[in-house]
Image (spheres, rainbow, N blue to C red):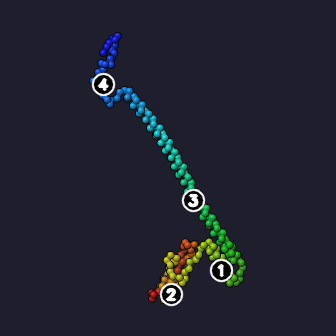
Amino acid sequence: MARTNGKSEVNPQEIDVAHELPPGEETGDDIASAGRVTTSEDSALRAEIQKLKAERDTLVDRLARLQAEFENSRKRAAREQQEFREYAVADVIKSLLPILDSFERALQSPSSRSGEFRDGVELIYKQLQDALAKMGVKPIPAKGEPFDPHLHQAVEMVETTEADDHQILEELQRGYKFKDRLLRPSMVKVAKNSRQ
C-alpha cells in the first residue's frame, strides 16, 4: 500500500486475496439488484391479485344477477300456471252455465204433469253429459263388466251363482275418466261365485 498525503491508496497488485468473498456470496450491489427483482415480482403479483379480485367481483355480480333472474322466472312460471288454471276452470264453468239455465227454467215452469218434469230433467242430464264429453270426461262402464281394481272400487261382495266370479252386479256410483286419467272409480257390488 502506498501513502500519499496521509491517505492510503490501494494498489491493485497488493489486493489481499485471502479476504476476497468466495463465489456464491452476494455483494451489496447483488442484494440491491435482487431487491429490485423482488419489488418488480411483488408488483406483478399485486397486479395479478387485483385482476383476480376484479374477476371474482364480476363473477359474484353475475351470479347474483342470475339468481335474481332465476327467481323472477320461477315466480313468472308459477303465476302463468295459476292464470292457466283459472282460465281452464272458467272455460269449464262457461260450458256448464247453459245447463244451470235449463235447471232454473225447469224449476220455474208451472208444470202440472210429472212426466213433463221428468222429460225436462232427462234433457238437462243429456246436456250435462254432452258438455262433459266435449271436455274429455267419459263414464267408466261397470255393470256386467269384470271387476278391475284400477277402475272400480268394490263396496260389497255378493254370493251368487247367476253371475261369473268377480263380475260387477250393480253400479252404486258412476266412475269417470278424464281422457286417460281416472277422476273417480266406480263404486260397485261384485259377484262372488264359489262354484267357478
- Asked if 87 appears above or below 31 in the picture, the reply is below
Q: Rate crowding at label 2 as few (under 14), some (14 to 19) or many (20 or more) other CA atoms within 10 Å.
A: some
Q: Nearer the viewer, mark 1 or mark 4?
A: 4
- Amino acid type shown at disc 1: Glu
Q: Earlier in the sequence, mark 3 or mark 1?
A: 3
Q: Position of residue 78 (x, y in %)?
A: 57, 59
Q: Earlier in the sequence, mark 4 or mark 3?
A: 4
- Amino acid type shown at disc 2: Ala
Q: Which residue is mark 4?
A: 20
- Asked if 73 appears above or below 141 in the picture, the reply is above
Q: Which residue is mark 1?
A: 122
Q: Nearer the viewer, residue 50 or 150?
A: 50
Q: Earlier in the sequence, mark 3 or mark 2?
A: 3
Q: Which residue is mark 2?
A: 163
Q: Earlier in the sequence, mark 1 or mark 2?
A: 1
Q: CA distance from mark 3 to mark 2?
A: 52 Å
Query: Hey, which residue is sitting farthest left in the picture?
Result: 18
The disc at residue 78 is 3
C-beta proximity under 8 Å, tags 4 and 2 = no
The answer, for residue 63, to whether it is visible in the render is: yes
Q: CA distance from mark 4 to mark 2?
A: 123 Å
Q: CA distance from mark 1 to mark 2?
A: 31 Å
